[in-house]
Amino acid sequence: MTIQELQQEIIRIKKEKDICILAHSYQTREITEIADFTGDSFQLSVQAQKAEQSTVIMCGVRFMAETVKLLSPQKKVLLANPVAGCPMAEQMDKEMITAVKEKYPDYTVVAYINTTTELKTVCDVCVTSSSAVKIVKALPEKNILFIPDCNLGSFVQKQIPEKNIKLLQGGCPIHARITEKQAVAAKNAHPGALLLVHPECVPEVVKHADFVGSTSAIMKFAEESDAKEFIIGTEIAIGQHLSYICPDKRFYALSKELICPNMKATSLADVYHAVCGDGGEEIQLDEDTMRKARVCIDRMIELG
């Protein structure tokens, strides 16, 4: 089959079998085109919660599928490609953070959404890249242990100097590998372009940005801006998607290294096999784990 024929077959089967397909924005174009919803990880979980379908397929990574299951425990949730993980989410585990909490008992643990469900069970509140500053600022506690991304934590720290934020060494290896030298070189190569970066980038890169925000925020900024040229400092797929959305604008990758192999692990064929029922992996979480993990997510929703 051609790509178009495979897409049409997936769309036919998902309607027939009452399936909702979610695709993170870092997925390839042929996958986002057949998705019911595309966006950031938590945003997709909320959309799945509202969707009428009883089965949900996540085209993304494991922690995202787990979050969908946490918000919609009554639904069948499949991860399209079982090997698609997240190095950041897997950097810290429940045992490690439990030990750190014992060392700093007066610290509130703020967990980035990019963490496993098991780790969330020992955290106090969850945040996304778009809500982190707002939620940490709203917390009554002054002492904050921010995990796992020290770069996002550093970004939050600069916005809220009145908080005492402790960071651990962790983060996204894809965003973190981008250097200040590369940021400066990209701006010199495209002097008329605005630099838009994700806060998972190191502070030395962030300081050169014209805009810092989540994936969805970067896309929204580029779509609404009067500027015609942009350097995109997040996964390379975003610039590609934007070139379709805004063909009259030019988008340049900050670095060709901004490719997430875990996000690219999912293929259109994986989605096809998942909707057919002979592919993907069903996410199974026990009730006790879900109940404990929901505490930090519910507090995030409560705070904004």
Image: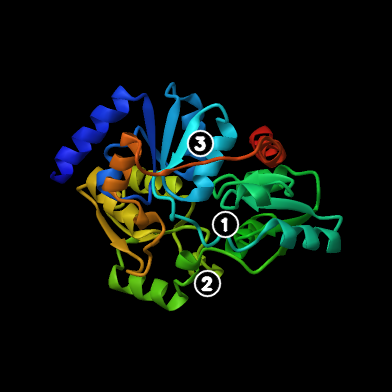
**Looking at the image, which is closer to me, 8 or 277?**
277
**How far apart are labels 2 and 1 at the CA level?**
23 Å
Residue bearing the label numbered 1: 89
- The residue sitting at 28% across, 37% down in the picture is 34
Q: In this view, does 145 lie to the left or right of 148?
A: right
- The residue sitting at 50% across, 43% down in the picture is 65
Percent position of residue 110, x then y: 70, 51
Q: Kindly tell me whether residue 32 is visible in this rendering.
A: no
- Residue type at mark 2: give it: Glu
**Residue 9, disc:** none
Outermost residue, top side: 52
Residue bearing the label numbered 2: 204
- Residue type at mark 1: give it: Ala
Disc 1 element: loop
**How far apart are labels 2 and 3 at the CA level?**
32 Å
Disc 3 element: helix
- Ranked by sequence position, the earlier of labels 1 and 3 is 3
- What crowding class fits label 1: few (fewer than 14 Cα within 10 Å), some (14-19), or many (20 or more)? many
- What crowding class fits label 2: few (fewer than 14 Cα within 10 Å), some (14-19), or many (20 or more)? some
**Residue 45, disc:** 3
Q: Which of marks 2 and 3 is in front?
A: 3
- Ranked by sequence position, the earlier of labels 2 and 3 is 3
- Ranked by sequence position, the earlier of labels 2 and 1 is 1
- The residue sitting at 73% across, 62% down in the picture is 96
Percent position of residue 22, x then y: 40, 38
Percent position of residue 210, x then y: 44, 59
- The residue sitting at 55% across, 30% down in the picture is 72
- What crowding class fits label 3: few (fewer than 14 Cα within 10 Å), some (14-19), or many (20 or more)? many
Q: Is residue 258 left or right of residue 121?
A: left
Residue contact between numbered discs 2 and 3, judged by CB atoms under 8 Å: no
Residue contact between numbered discs 2 and 1, judged by CB atoms under 8 Å: no
